[in-house]
Amino acid sequence: MKTSPQRESVAASASLEGRPLHRVWLRRLLHAAVASVLFSPLACRMPDKPVALPARHSVESEQLVVLSDFKLPKDHELIKNLNQLRDEVATELNLPLKQNRVIVYLFSDEHTYREYLNTVFPGLPNRRAYFVGTSHDLAVYTYWGDRIQEDLRHEYTHGLLHGSMKHVPLWLDEGLAEYFEVDNREPGHVNAEYVRRLDDMRSKGWKPQIERLEQIERFGDMRLADYQESWAWVHFMLHSTPEARKDLLSYIDDLRAGRAPTLLSARLKRHSPDLEARFLSHLESLQPARVRLGSR
């Protein structure tokens, strides 16, 4: 069964130099593969003793469903944190709270998780977490690890966005997920490592260009710096000026309604002809030494 390209995607967390990297969207590459595996009764040939999806225990809370093979209390701090995240995403982005369930398949250990993925999605890179969004399901696959909250905040954000909007541009989808991944106990969702890396790039001649990000449609064309810049543009729009916030929210409202929106870059430049300079000034304001380096 073929599903809409705008609703079909796979997101993953990766690692580079010993630290988590961006989530990689495999929308184009795996479109047919994911659809056939998930929805065709003949496509997936399992081994004699397949690794089953976690299903022994379930926790349902608001829009979130967590299926696991170990008991996770409904009042667990992780569940409460994700419920707070849902409220925060809805409030910050003016998104109506939907009932589209986001199902988290939470494996108890990394080995079982990878064995399942290697069976059902052979050939995928080793990643800590995957989000699969189709016109039928919003699902996250991950395992209980040291960064479970970080990973689930990111992937659950993807689920909330795709459950509320008909289409989310790649760069904005990742920028928002990176933004909300930072726990709200960190003031302003500042990812201090991204700030440091972007500042280092700037010292070597890098210049921001939102129009270039808007043109990226394939995950393979996004570099680590693009994920960092996407996070920074989201932070700029939500924290710099009321006009920039309004531009972002009106754009998101157009996406939610299925309208063909004017590009964000054009909206922002109507209020700020010197947009790149304002962006860099905002980025510089995030650099005080009191900002704690993030765990990413």
Image: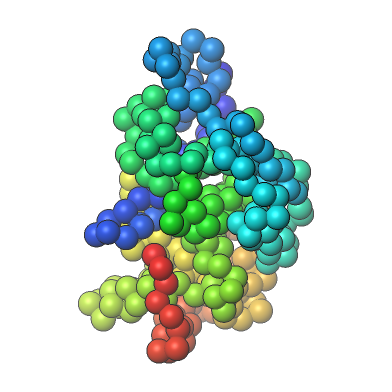
Q: Quadrant of residue 288?
A: bottom left
Q: Is residue 265 above or below residue 69?
A: below
What residue lies at 48% left-to-right and 48% top-to-bottom?
144
Is residue 154 visible in this depiction of the protein? no
Q: Nearer the viewer, residue 158 or 260?
A: 158
Location of residue 29 in the rendering, given as x and y in whole percent from the top left corner: 38, 33
Of residues 243 and 94, the one drawn nearer to the viewer in this rendering: 94
In the image, 232 versus 296, the foreground residue is 296
Q: Residue at x 49, y 75 (%)?
A: 190
Rendered-image quadrant of the C terminus:
bottom left
Compared with residue 247, is residue 51 higher up or lower down, i.e. above or below?
Answer: above
Instruction: Say whether residue 125 is left or right of residue 285.
Output: left
Count the marks: 0
Q: Residue at x 53, y 15 (%)?
A: 40
Indicate the position of residue 69 as horizontal and vertical percent values.
56, 36
- 150 to the left or right of 111: right
Instruction: Estimate the x, y position of residue 275 in percent, counting from the top left.
Output: 48, 77
Q: Quadrant of the N terminus?
A: top right
Write down the quadrant of residue 194 in the picture.
bottom left
- Residue occupying the point 56% across, 67% down: 183
| x and y percentages locating residue 282 in the rendered image | 48, 82
On the question of residue 60 being in view, the answer is yes
Instruction: Say which of 290 and 146 sits in front.
Output: 146
Q: What colour-coding does the image apply?
A: rainbow
